[in-house]
Image (cartoon, grey):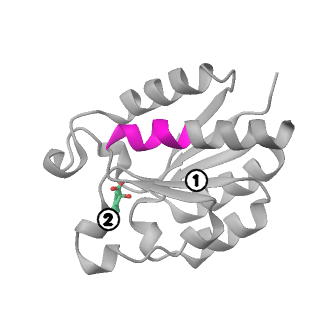
Amino acid sequence: MPKPIYVLNGPNLNLLGQREPEVYGHATLDDVKDRVAARAEQFSLPIEFYQSNKEGELVDWIQEARAKACGLIINAGAYTHTSVAILDALLAADIPCVEVHLSNIFKREEFRHHSYISTACVGVICGFGVKSYELAVEALAERLETKRG
Ligand code: DQA
């Protein structure tokens, strides 16, 4: 069994489907989980899917991923724009990380244009709703396969 991809979701993403649907769409976080799991299964990769409103808990999961995961997908929510702690955890993780956002953060308020965590990530995918996560799985799977081969 290959190591899983860790998929981490930050604050307020538990409210997906109810929260500003005009920005984030109508899919719930459970829908996101199902679609990510289905896409990952096509690459024979298991997933571990988590959400927390607490910065420290996200840091703990990134540290766990360091040992237990083959790669990481993170939507850090608002912590994207504030958290040096999450950046440092990702820099220490030593596994490929992809940053995702449902919305196109560059089309929105200026404070969302800067991400603290992008420099620790292989790439950033934003603006495609739930599809952003599926594209991240695809990109990560391809990268892991390239490394293996
Ligand atoms: C978000 C964008 C962030 O700016 C915002 O704080 C979120 C969600 C997105 O997925 O579009 O909580 O990460």
4 sits to left or right of 81: right
Q: Residue at x 32, y 43 (%)?
A: 129
**In which quadrant of the rendered view does residue 93 lie?**
bottom right
| Quarter of the picture holding the N terminus | top right
The disc labelled 2 sits on which kind of residue?
Ile
Looking at the rendered structure, the kind of residue marked 1 is: Val
Q: Is residue 132 magenta?
A: yes
Asked if residue 122 lies in the magenta stretch, the reply is: no
> Of the residues under marks 1 and 2, which one precedes in the sequence?
1
Look at 38% across and 38% down and name the residue there: 131
- Which residue is outermost to the left? 22
Q: Secondary structure at mark 2?
A: helix
Instruction: Judge the density around disc 2: few (<14), some (14-19), many (≥20) Cα neighbours within 10 Å.
Output: some
For disc 1, the neighbor class at 10 Å (few under 14, some 14 to 19, many from 20) is: many
Is 43 in front, or is 51?
43
Q: In terms of secondary structure, where does tag 1 sit?
A: strand
Residue behind label 2 places its C-beta within 8 angstroms of ligand 1:
yes
Q: Residue at x 29, y 44 (%)?
A: 15
Q: What secondary structure do most residues of the magenta stretch adopt?
A: helix
Of the numbered discs in the image, which one, if any, rests on residue 63? none
User: What's the CA distance linking mark 1 and mark 2?
Assistant: 15 Å
* Residue 100 position in % (x across, y down): 46, 53
Quadrant of res 78: bottom left
Magenta stretch bounds? 129-137
Q: Quadrant of the C terminus?
A: top right
Q: Which mark is residue 98?
A: 1
Q: Quadrant of residue 89?
A: bottom right
Q: Which residue, given by chain and number where applicable, does mark 2 sit on? A: 105
Give the answer, above or below, for where 46 lies relative to 123.
Answer: above
